[in-house]
Image (cartoon, rainbow, N blue to C red):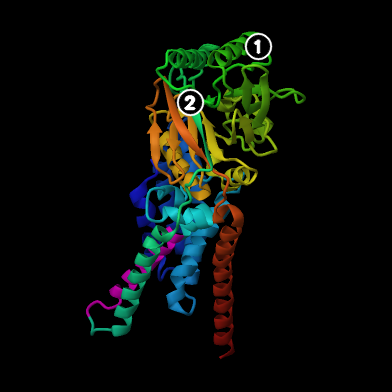
């Protein structure tokens, strides 16, 4: 899971451990902290193999090497009371790079995602996930500064200045912690829509969740037909639209007539538009597949679609396939590469204009933000976590939904093949959620909103500014250190 207690405790710990060290010692300290953190955070990858868990954890921990070295550098800067600010900005610089490099980055382990139900969370409505991360990091570095000030007072005469510094750091840390409570979270609905979320379930968890062909599709078709029977009998109010998860159709409905017919049967039974998740062969590039959400109308059939923009490297496509496949035979389990889409997922499904985000795309700021700014009135996450069921990964992703809801002032609806499907209100409250590996249907009335948050309007500007402050603080420390050495040689 997202290791919530450590997410805040590690921040002052690393600041304390790097204090008074050499740059090289700080770099190794950063790596030594990052490696076990990511191993525990990403242990759900053991389903693929423990080598995958350790390998990705090592890669992610490498980003903590310049972070640890940078914390040492800025500790030598003048104006001590500003050092916690510079240190917090360094954390954002680390997340900035790790979220983008390589292959589009990997966002797991961000401070913001470990604080989706805390007093910091409302800050997302002002500056997105980066501002939440910054507030968490600043609290930790301030507490570290207070601890260092108190440690300097041990065994000696009272030092009013040190005591004042410690008290001031604690007071500012407390103010940062509660600042989010003063941020208004927009939740007033401009309209509403009744939806149904179908979780059809899979044959078994793990790497071979697909089972026999048509199994997953039939599960979703049958659950939808049962929903239609409940509607006809008056037990459930008829929804305005139905949402199926990612990979709900395990066969390309445009290539397999039986798959097309079964989807059409379910859609006509419920007699409202259905957002269908399916893998579709690329129409022009042979050997490539598209991960799509398709709007399926009961009268006109399949229509508009959204293609996943950020396929998972080594999961949905293999970089350097020809070279790596010679040494890593496991990559043969990804026989075809997913081709990325090039536009946001705003789709009209019945009366609702929703923003489709597929699976772990929800972890990337710009994908969700672009979808909302393009006109989405609610956010839908079509996901398939069957491979990582009962490992804690679905809960980590659920935490991200809560942050995105507050960040964009939108209800977030998750449809998962095997769970966790959920309904999250615009204020981040989880109103409904399913159990894993069960067939279930959720029905809810979802608020639709047109207004945007400050975070939507400012975009990535806060992240860029904070990251640049962190980088420039290190540059200033290097310049000042070089000048000091030159002065010593001159003397």
Q: Residue at x 47, y 41 (%)?
A: 401
Who is closer to the viewer here, 66 or 239?
239
Camera sees residue 439 = yes
Camera sees residue 52 = no
Residue of label 1 = 256
Quarter of the C terminus within the rendering: bottom right
Q: Assign the magenta stretch its main secondary structure.
A: helix
Residue density around tag 1, few if under 14, some if 14–19, many if 20 or more, within 10 Å: few
Nearer the observer: mark 1 or 2; the answer is 2
| Range shown magenta | 135-155
Give the side of residue 441 with respect to residue 452, left or right.
left
Who is closer to the viewer here, 2 or 221?
221
Q: Which mark is residue 196?
A: 2
CA separation in Å, label 1 and label 2: 26 Å
In the rendered view, tell whether residue 73 sits above or below residue 371. Answer: below
Give the side of residue 329 with respect to residue 417, left or right.
right
Quarter of the N terminus within the rendering: top left
Q: Dot 1 lies on which element?
A: loop
Q: Residue at x 57, y 86 (%)?
A: 487
Which residue is the extreme one toward the bottom?
A: 491
Q: Is residue 350 magenta?
A: no
Residue 316 x, y percent position in the rendering: 60, 30
Q: Residue at x 63, y 45 (%)?
A: 370
């Amino acid at each position: 899971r997202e290791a919530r207690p450590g997410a805040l405790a590690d921040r002052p710990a690393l600041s304390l451990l790097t204090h008074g060290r050499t740059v090289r010692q700080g770099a190794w300290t950063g790596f030594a902290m990052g490696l076990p953190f990511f191993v525990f955070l990403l242990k759900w990858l053991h389903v693929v193999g423990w080598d995958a868990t350790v390998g990705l954890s090592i890669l992610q921990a490498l980003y903590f090497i310049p972070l640890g070295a940078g914390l040492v550098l800025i500790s030598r800067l003048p104006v001590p009371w500003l050092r916690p600010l510079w240190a917090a900005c360094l954390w954002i610089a680390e997340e900035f790079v790790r979220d983008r490099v390589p292959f589009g980055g990997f966002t797991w382990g961000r401070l913001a995602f470990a604080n989706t139900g805390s007093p910091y969370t409302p800050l997302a409505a002002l500056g997105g996930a980066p501002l939440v991360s910054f507030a968490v990091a600043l609290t930790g570095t301030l507490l570290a500064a207070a601890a260092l000030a108190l440690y300097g007072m041990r065994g000696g005469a009272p030092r009013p200045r040190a005591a004042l510094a410690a008290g001031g750091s604690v007071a500012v840390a407390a103010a940062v912690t509660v600042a989010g409570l003063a941020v208004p979270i927009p939740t007033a609905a401009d309209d509403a829509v009744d939806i149904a979320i179908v979780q059809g379930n899979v044959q078994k968890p793990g790497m071979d969740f697909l089972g026999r062909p048509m199994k997953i599709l039939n599960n979703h078709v049958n659950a939808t037909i049962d929903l239609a029977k409940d509607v006809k009998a008056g037990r459930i109010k008829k929804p305005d639209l139905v949402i199926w998860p990612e990979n709900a159709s395990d066969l390309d409905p445009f290539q397999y007539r039986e798959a097309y017919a079964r989807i059409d049967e379910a859609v006509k039974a419920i007699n409202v538009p259905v957002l269908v998740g399916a893998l579709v062969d690329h129409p022009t590039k042979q050997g490539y597949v598209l991960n799509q959400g398709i709007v399926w109308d009961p009268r006109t059939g399949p229509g508009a679609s959204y293609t996943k923009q950020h396929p998972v490297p080594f999961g949905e496509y293999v970089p350097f396939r020809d070279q790596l496949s010679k040494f890593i035979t496991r990559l043969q389990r990804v026989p075809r590469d997913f081709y990325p889409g090039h536009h946001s997922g705003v789709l009209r499904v019945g009366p609702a204009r929703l923003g489709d985000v597929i699976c772990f795309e929800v972890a990337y700021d710009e994908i969700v933000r672009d979808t909302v700014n393009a006109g989405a009135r609610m956010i839908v996450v079509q996901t398939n976590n069957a491979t990582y069921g009962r490992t804690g990964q679905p809960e980590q992703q659920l935490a991200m939904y809560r942050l995105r809801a507050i960040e964009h002032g939108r209800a977030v609806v998750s449809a998962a093949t095997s769970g966790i499907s959920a309904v999250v209100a615009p204020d981040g409250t989880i109103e409904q959620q399913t159990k894993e590996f069960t067939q279930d249907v959720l029905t809810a009335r979802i608020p639709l909103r047109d207004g945007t948050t400050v975070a939507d309007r400012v975009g990535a500007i806060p992240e860029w500014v904070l990251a640049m402050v962190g980088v420039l603080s290190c540059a200033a420390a290097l310049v000042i250190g070089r000048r000091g050495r030159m002065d010593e040689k001159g003397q």
